[in-house]
Amino acid sequence: MSKKKRQTVTLVVLCLVLIAAGVGYYALTRYQASKEKAEKAEEEKTEGLFQLSSDDICKVDFKGEKASLTFDKDGKTWKLSSDKNYPLNQDRIVDMVDETTGVAATQTVTTSCGDLTEYNLDKPDLTVTVTDNDGKDTTIYVGMESVAGGGRYAYCGGDEKKVYLISTSLYDSFNYSLGELMKVPELPSVQADEIRYLKLESATGKSFEAEYDEKNSPYKDIYGWSIKQPYTQPVAGDKDQLQNLFGSYTNLDLGSGVTYKKDAALEKKYGLDAPAYTLSFQTAKKKLTLYFGKETKDQSSYYVKVKGEDGIYLMDASTVSTLVNINALDYVYQRLYVGDKEKLDQVELSYNGKKYTFDVSKKKKKSETEYTYTITSGGKKVDSDTFNTAYSVISYLAPGGNIDKKVTVKSNKPVAEFTFREEKKTTKMIILPYDGKNSYRVSVNGVMQFTADKSAVDKVIKQFTSLK
């Protein structure tokens, strides 16, 4: 055979070998995948442990880590055996029953258990006994969670030898105290922009009260919101900031119950005879008043009463903290003098025994909405840019803080007095000494509740008195 023919034969043989190897590899991978799929299906195959439907069960008795309780079915309603009037959360009881009848073994751990302590089944974390309509009892015992995960150990009836692995969902469905199974009152659902009144009373004396009245509020020309407490006279409220505050009150829920009955002894025990906080708010159609007592020992919740309800309930501590920790100054309208430049006629300043008067006239530009302002003092024009800058600062002067009675004020003699005359309104702002360093006290139309930044006020006074 020639050399060329030998090379051809060798090449053909190699090709056949490669094809055979490819076919073999494909068959092997298919077989392996099929085997893994079968093994996985075998692992996932479950064995139902209760041959009952939810409709078959008329009684449930369980002993868990949080409670030991018995429920009886009366028609379609589940009732607490020891107190037929107890307001049970029916959805949770139904979930318990459904979870029990649906429990299945995901794995048979052993069929010859010799030591239940190995699985914490000598003292189960949960024991559930269901009674069917024929009076037959079926019991399942649930032990510790598998270290490897995937469920909890359990056995059924009296067969202690056969231990299964079941889903943790059965244990979770029964991991409730009696209070957590109480049907608690539903609190009104409101939107932040629906709230028209809010009052928080504190046992420490730090109260807050805000009210909206678009017709009768002294601040109806701003937003209509008045903040009445903690101030001696109402001050204007900031609508946007109040809306942010009200957002905390829109979806309130009670977590669980303590008692559904009127109980004066428990009210005293939990601090509800003299509440730490009383919170009331209302919309045009809904009202709600909550009384907050003490915190629970683990500080996770507060004891709560709802006006119109006899019971005592729990509310999450972080929620309560948000509701009752209100800094009133955060919700005050951030302008001490609410001026309107387009309506301004005159600004008068008394300072160091002198009076400075600035008359304002305006003229609308042709084909425009803006005005041209002319400022005169004593009949002579003054620099309008400097005036506009000074007026802008004074009209947007924000409250710097609440007046602290502990601060020693050396004098009540005014530092300066501003009078702002508009078309239908006159506002008088008096600047008075405060701490002598950082702040002045400010009185607006006889209401003096806030301080203002001293350096900002001094700068404004200098600008007005230097106008030429």
Image (tube, rainbow, N blue to C red):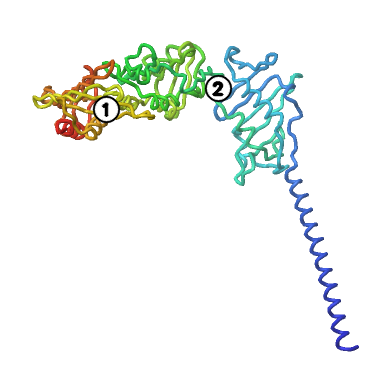
Q: Position of residue 110 (x, y in %)?
A: 71, 43
Image quadrant holding the C terminus, namely top left
Gap between marks 2 and 1, in whole Å? 59 Å
Q: Where is residue 295 in the image (x, y as percent from the top left)?
A: 41, 25
Depth check, front residue: 455 or 106: 455
Residue 91 sits above or below residue 25 on the image: above
Q: Position of residue 442 (x, y in %)?
A: 21, 24
Element at label 2: loop
- Closer to the camera: disc 2 or disc 1? 1
Residue type at mark 2 is: Leu
- The quadrant where residue 300 appears: top left
Mark number displayed over residue 178: 2
Q: Position of residue 251 (x, y in %)?
A: 50, 24
Left or right: 403, with 294 as reference point: left
Element at label 1: helix
Tell me the crowding category of disc 2: few under 14, some 14 to 19, or many 20 or more residues within 10 angstroms, Cα based.
some
Residue at the spot of label 1: 395
Mark number displayed over residue 249: none
Q: Which residue is drawn at 76% across and 46% down?
A: 42
Depth check, front residue: 87 or 462: 462
Q: Which residue is drawn at 74% across and 48% down?
A: 40
